[in-house]
Image (cartoon, rainbow, N blue to C red):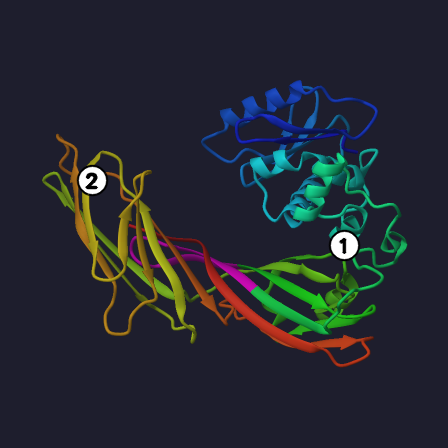
Amino acid sequence: MLQCVFVLSDSGEVMVEKQMTAHRVDRGICGWFWDYVLAHAGGDASKVVVSPTHYLFQVYRNGVTFLACTQVEMPPLMAIEFLSRVADVLTDYLGDLNEDIIKDNFVLVYQILDEMMDNGFPLTTEPNILKEMIAPPNIVSKMLNVVTGKSSNLGNKLPDAAASFVPWRTTVVKDASNEVYVNIVEELDACVNREGALVKCEAYGKIQVNSSLPGVPELSLSFSNPTIINDVRFHPCVRFRPWESNQILSFVPPDGQFELMSYRVKKLKAIPIYVKPQLTSDSGNCRVNVMVGIKNDPGKPIDSITVQFRLPPLIASADLTANYGTVDILADQTCLWTIGQIPKDKAPSLSGNLCLEEGLTHLHTFPTFEVKFKIMGVALSGLQIDKLEVRNTPNAPYKGFRAQTQAGRYEVRS
């Protein structure tokens, strides 16, 4: 049972305080928590913290910390999942999530928290139902609130879906175009050591669905190779037994966009592009040469390629140029090389010289190169959709499929 939820800014300011039970939690707990965060600034602060008086749970999103407190033992994952759902719902309502947006819409934030939890227990967490109960903000409603002085967006009646066996779906879907789109979105994490050997390569993926189907449709999604995926996490609409027995996703979808499942594919053997850095230092200078090229052609264009690295400490000046793309030295001493697409007629390379501070002859700390890219039309994990069956619709719907891979934590040591 959660007793209180706080929303904190990046400076530790309490922007929202929502007491969930009759037992009030003193705001001073936020000061203790912030001292703990500052003490662990060098590393990742734990999501579960035990203070002298409370159990604390935190979720951090875009400079905003969601903090929940309780004095009784409870499953930590329930608290973390609830805070994550609060952050997702606010992002869905407000379009983005940051300190200024929270302050501009704090009345709406209080209303949403009021409906999402009742007496310390999660109640209504589905965006579809919440949007029927609390209207999302828009320009017209904001102008009417200013003119009339009314600041509440609460509806007058309880949504029908609140008592439905599929509470994530509205009972009457308006403007249903009889379409469903399934997107595979993956992030590739990789680590390449200084000898050029692949140490680790994993893909973290999401199955995103955009449904605009009438009535209460039944969907079944199957994969050609479901055995490669691990650590799956499902939307509440997914029935677990068909997946457990046959690796089939059977579900009644919410209306609109939602994340059907997330997964991980481990021990991948191939990476799409290579980065070969060479750094040699002597006599107070460090010569830099970095080459980039396609290692395993995915069959689709590789776009938005960038390579960046932080300049080592004790560097007096840097003179770096590239035969393709642009090179920028940012204010935080990060070198950003923007390539875009790799041309067919030459391999992009970056070269130049780093001058060490006076008194130094050799570079003792070598940088790690971070690579970003995007590939449309392919999932590098190899996951493929076999078929999507749609039942309980008056007409055969249009079905669309798409895949995308982008770099996550893709590092090359030097």
Q: Residue at x 24, y 62 (%)?
A: 324
Point out residue 359 in the picture as x, y percentages from the top left corner. Answer: 13, 30
Q: Nearer the viewer, residue 298 or 174?
A: 174
Give residue 301's quadrant in the image.
Answer: bottom left
Q: In the figure, 112 relative to 273: above or below?
A: above
Q: Can see residue 380?
A: yes
Q: Earlier in the sequence, mark 2 or mark 1?
A: 1
Q: Can see residue 75?
A: no
| Circle 1: residue type | Asn
**Alpha-carbon neighbours of circle 2 within 10 Å: few (<14), some, or many (≥20)?**
many
Q: Residue at x 44, y 66 (%)?
A: 269
On-image quarter of the N terminus:
top right
Secondary structure, mark 2, is: loop
Point out residue 117 in the picture as x, y percentages from the top left corner. Answer: 79, 39
Q: Nearer the viewer, residue 383 or 136?
A: 136
Distance from label 2 to label 1 (Cα)? 57 Å
**Alpha-carbon neighbours of circle 1 within 10 Å: few (<14), some, or many (≥20)?**
many
What range of the chain is rendered magenta? 185-203
Give the residue at the far front of this rendering.
147
Let me know if residue 408 is in the magenta part: no
Mark 2 highlights which residue?
A: 363
Point out residue 111 in the picture as x, y percentages from the top left corner. Answer: 76, 38
Q: Nearer the viewer, mark 2 or mark 1?
A: 1
Q: Residue at x 63, y 69 (%)?
A: 182
Mark 1 highlights which residue?
A: 128
Q: Nearer the viewer, residue 349 or 409?
A: 349
Identify the main secondary structure in magenta. strand
Let me know if residue 189 is in the magenta part: yes
Q: In the figure, 282 relative to 412: above or below?
A: above
Q: Residue at x 38, y 73 (%)?
A: 297
